[in-house]
Amino acid sequence: MSTVRLVTPLPRPTSTAAALPTLILPLATPLPTATPILYTVQAGDTLIDIARRYGVSVEALRAANGNIAPERLQIGQPLIIPPPTPIGPAGSDNLLLPTPTPLPLELAGLSVRETAVGSLWFLGEVHNPTNVAVEHVAVRVSLTDAGGRELGGGLVYTALDLITPGGRSPFGLLFPGRPAGLASFQAALVSAEPVAALGDRAPDLAVTEHSGGPAGTLYRVTGKVQNTGEVAVEEVLIVITLYDAQGAVTGFRAQTLHLHLEPGATAPFDVRVIPSGGTARYSVAAQGWRSGGG
């Protein structure tokens, strides 16, 4: 388990931060009531993209927005993001049980950032130092007081659902406010399994070129991704992770490209990330899905 002690004041972003994939729900001690999350649909967004980003099911997202049809999604349209299933205390019906023996992955780049509206972001990444690809990678984050008593917490999955050997994937949790007595955050890996079957996933993608730098209040990364496999790819997920000079994660974004990419073909990408601190470097990862599954 990794622990992050709070410092005063916490680092603040230079602009109001967007919500990360999972909203923390209260455990034994109630957290301050969160303002409902509203997301504005961006160019290229789909319900699947948005649901993945916030850690909710497509069905729950549709239900929270009047059973909206995917084909009726419009740029600029506001969507209500429903809360994920809460993680309850021991003995509750909502307790998530960890896998019996999670693989020896590493938590890295952990940091806590305060937004301009007083919310707290817990950011980090999972490194896979093993020689096997892993999936279902989940991290449990707990808020504790000075005596180690848990004040609240939640679960989040990594942005990439498959982490290759030597690979990394970011994760992030948004807390709506600071509970009284909060002294530290603790993070622990609770789930990580060897990949048994790829299904329709296509790991044979390579980022052949990329460059990045500040773009106003955002950080912009552009580049090209190539299909190095033997079958066509219909969807590509680009994950950009930002780091400060100490290697702490300061932000990330997962953006889906809907395209048809034949073997050997390349496609451009252009991703803008909201940083929650100074950006010293960034990383790029890509994951794809094959045509027709299987």
Image: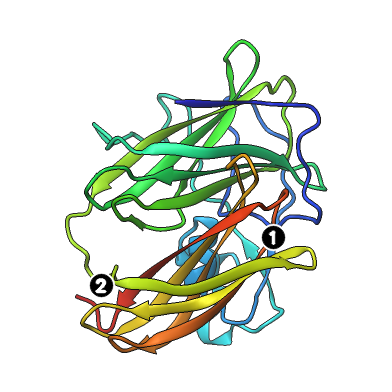
Which residue corresponds to mark 1? Answer: 274
**Position in image of residue 240 (x %, y %):** 54, 62
Q: Position of residue 243 (x, y in %)?
A: 60, 49
| Amino acid tagged 1 | Ile
Q: Looking at the image, is 195 positioned above or below residue 185?
A: below
Tell me if residue 221 can be seen.
Answer: yes
Disc 1 crowd rating (10 Å Cα; few below 14, some 14-19, many 20+) is many
On the image, which quarter does residue 120 sit in? top right
Secondary structure at numbered mark 2: loop
Q: Position of residue 283 (x, y in %)?
A: 51, 58
Q: Which mark is residue 200?
A: 2
Pick whichever, 54 or 222, lies toward us.
Answer: 222
First-in-chain label (2 vs 1): 2
Q: Residue at x 51, y 83 (%)?
A: 268
Is residue 205 positioned above or below 27 on the image? below
Q: How is the image coloured?
A: rainbow
